[in-house]
Amino acid sequence: MLKGPMDLFRALAIARIGLGLATLFNTLEMYKTLSRVVDTTIAIPFIESLPAPTEAGVWLVTGLGAVAGLALTVGWYARPAAVLATVVSAWIFLWDQQTYSSHRTLALLLIAMLCFTACDRVWALRPRTEGRTATWAPLLMLTQLSVCYLFAGLSKVNSVFLTGRQFDHWLWLDLPAELDMALA
């Protein structure tokens, strides 16, 4: 439980670092998807009037996403980096429908909310010494994650999942059926 403003700033710094790393990984993943779109004739643009992805455009967007993710992770101009990461992710989503995934959408929403916080007050390469954080933004981030985990948990309350059989396919360990059921 958060006891004071420093606890909030530390929590926001952890969120900033995690979302910065997620931005780096998501950018690399999007690069692979968009490279396949450029190399083939299978493009599914979200908006037809946007220019089609080109090799140079994919490299530019990948570079900008990597810089934004790295800057977020280390806390160097974190708020502008969060804005850049939000714009790059939104552009990639609009560029081609094949880049959509739920984890990228969740990261995009959380990074957009991070733009309104003082996430660079602590554990930052360039810490801010003043400025306020919007109180609604961390609460909205917490609510977003809570809703995500709530529905993920509720979706697993069914007879198929609770048997534990899916762990036989997901895990490389051969566990007894009783342990699989306990894990479920």
Image: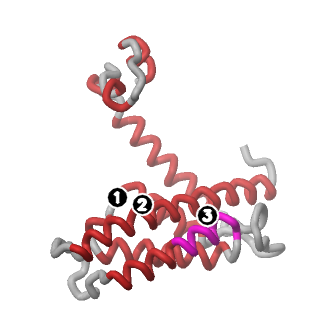
Horizontal and vertical percent position of residue 32: 35, 65
Q: Which residue is mark 3?
A: 136
Q: Quadrant of residue 118?
A: bottom right
Mark 3 or 2: the one toward you: 2
Q: Residue visible at 79% across and 71% down? A: 127
Residue at position x 66%, y 72% from top? 78
Q: Mark 2: which amino acid? A: Arg
Residue where numbered disc 1 is placed: 101
Residue 36: x percent and y percent?
27, 69
Give the mark nearer the N terminus: 3 vs 1: 1
Q: Residues within 10 Å of mark 1 (few under 14, many from 20)?
A: few
Q: In this view of the protein, which residue sits in the foreground, 154 or 18?
A: 18
For this orientation, the residue located farthest to the left is 41
Q: Which residue is mark 2?
A: 104
- Looking at the image, which residue is at 49% across and 60% down? 25
Amino acid type for the residue under numbered disc 3: Trp
Range drawn in magenta: 66-75
At a point 81% along the width and 57% down the height, the residue shown is 6
* Side of 84 relative to 45 (left or right): right
Task: Indicate the secondary structure of the residue bearing disc 1.
Answer: loop
